[in-house]
Each structure stands twice: as structure tokens, then as C-alpha cells.
Amino acid sequence: MHIKSLSIIFISLILMMSACKPTKIITNEPTENNSKNPKVLVKRMNAASLDFQWFSGKAKIKYIDMTQNRSVRTSIAIRRDSMIWMSVSLFGIEGVRVKILPDSVHIINRLEKQYIVKPLSLIEEQFNLPADFSAIQAMLVGNPVIYKESEFTVQIEESQYILQTEKPVKTAYTINKSTYQLNNLLIKDEKNQTMDMSFQEYAPADEKRNFSFLRDILLTSPGQGAKKSASVNMAFSKAVFDVPKKMSFRVPKSYKRMK
């Protein structure tokens, strides 16, 4: 079993999240309470984002596509803007350990005693998506990813707002009317590849933060005669903020480096 096949669940989930580059949209303080104003809603959505320096969590990830149906347990740790660390276990045995830095991806395959080090552009090569560390970091904790210089329209429903933009890529943010946190994120690129991600089961992670403990993700892309699709379910059992976490990543000397 190669590194790519063993870590397909992790790669499909986390690297697909880097489909857009996050940039906070800075606006002047609104002079009136106008929820139909896109700038007002973007400002409130940004204000509701989870601020942190450290994050750690545990999650069960289920991945289903046309060829496989697998579940793994994952431990996650993030030091903001510095490092994302993950340990992926299958059948109770750690199979993959991953380290993502702002410029590179490092993967250890313990079952095959192999490791790989690649620039973050590995994401672009394998998934045809722009690589962005900050976007992966934001989506793991459930924060919105905002495109720079996007022009939004607003649709109002009974309990939520929908912020929509066509540029630089078609995106819809469904926002809870009470908390201004994400209920759903839908991205569709020029090749009609889509990522539809829902954020569910919000609950307090601590006194300051309301965290989405359940994420459902549907990935689709056009295929010959039919659409190709994959689904990912990510259920967190633990989420801790601002407690430093040891992120060990040592490659044994006997392991072979793969190209």
C-alpha cells in the first residue's frame, strides 16, 4: 500500500479545503443595522470567526467514493499560522502522520515504513486546486474562507442569510441569523467541480467559542457520462483551544523517502 492510497481520506478532505484563499474583508463600521448589506454580513461573519493560537481535536472521518468506503480516527493539532499536525489511525493502529507547513506537506506511512516531503503545490498537482495553508487552517476549525475583492449579493431566508458571489469562483455562504456562523459553504469552479460542506451540531468548546462538531462534505466533478462524487463525514469528539500541544514528527532512519 502506497502513501497516496493510505492517506486518501486525509488528502481528499483537508486538501480539497484549500480551494480558496482566505482574506478578511475590512469594512468601515456600518452606520445602520442593515442585514441586507453584504458588507455588514461579511463583517459580522468575520467577527464570529473563532480566534485562537492553538487548536487540538479528535475526529472520526468516514470517506466514501466509487471505489472505497473507509473510516479512520484522527487527532489534529494546529499552531496558528505555523503548523498543522495530524495522526490518522485505521483499526486502532496509526498508519499515517502528517505535517503541513506554510510551504510544504510531510507524510509518514508507518505501515510501509516510507515518508514523503513535498511542496504545498502537491495539492495543485494532485487535485488541481490552489494551495493555501491559511484556508486549510480556517476550515479545520470551522471559520469562513473569504475571497479577496469578492462582490456579494444577499438572499434572506427564514433563519439564515445566503451570501453569494460569482468571482473569482462561484461561492455561497449560508449563515445562521443568530450567531453569524457558517451553516453551509458551497464552492463551484470553472470546471464545474463542487465542494458542498455543511457545518452542524454547534456546541460550546469553551466559554468563548461555539464549535461545529459535525461536518458533511460532498465533492463532485464531471465525468464521462456521469458525475464523479465522494462524500466525507467528519465527526469531532473533542475540540480544545489555546492549550499548547506537542506535535511530534520524527522520521525513523530506516524509513525510505519516496519521490
Image (cartoon, rainbow, N blue to C red):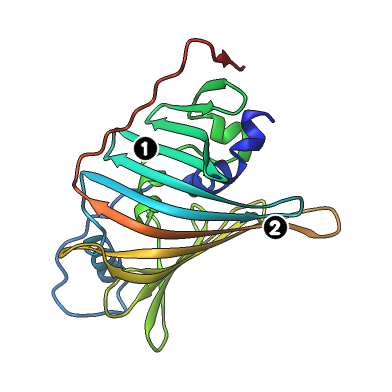
Disc nearer the start of the sequence (2/1): 1
Which residue lies under the disc numbered 2?
229
Query: Quick one: SS at disc 1?
Result: strand
Mark 2 crowd level (few <14, some 14–19, many ≥20, 10 Å Cα): some
Residue 113 on image: x %, y %: 58, 21
User: Residue 234's mark?
Assistant: none
In front of the other: 91 or 224? 91
Q: CA distance from mark 2 to mark 1?
A: 27 Å
Mark 1 crowd level (few <14, some 14–19, many ≥20, 10 Å Cα): many
In front of the other: 39 or 74? 74
Which residue lies under the disc numbered 1?
84
**207 versus 72 height, above or below:** below
- Identify which amino acid the numbered label 2 is placed on: Ser
Residue 123 on image: x %, y %: 55, 35
In front of the other: 190 or 102? 102
Give me the residue at 67% from left, 51% from top: 191
- Tell me, yes or no, whether the two marked residues, 2 and 1, touch with CB atoms within 8 Å: no
Query: Quick one: SS at disc 2?
Result: strand
Q: How many marks?
A: 2
Q: Residue furthest top?
A: 253
Give me the residue at 13% from left, 74% from top: 31
- Identify which amino acid the numbered label 1 is placed on: Ile
Residue 207 on image: x %, y %: 15, 65
Q: Which corner quadrant holds the N terminus?
A: top right
Does the image show residue 5? yes
Q: Which corner quadrant holds the C terminus?
A: top right
Give me the residue at 36% from left, 48% from top: 22
Relative horizontal placement of residue 138, taking residue 187 as reference (left or right): left
Q: In which quarter of the view is residue 227 placed?
A: bottom right
Give me the residue at 34% from left, 70% from top: 202
Residue 90 on image: x %, y %: 57, 44
Q: Residue furthest front?
A: 92
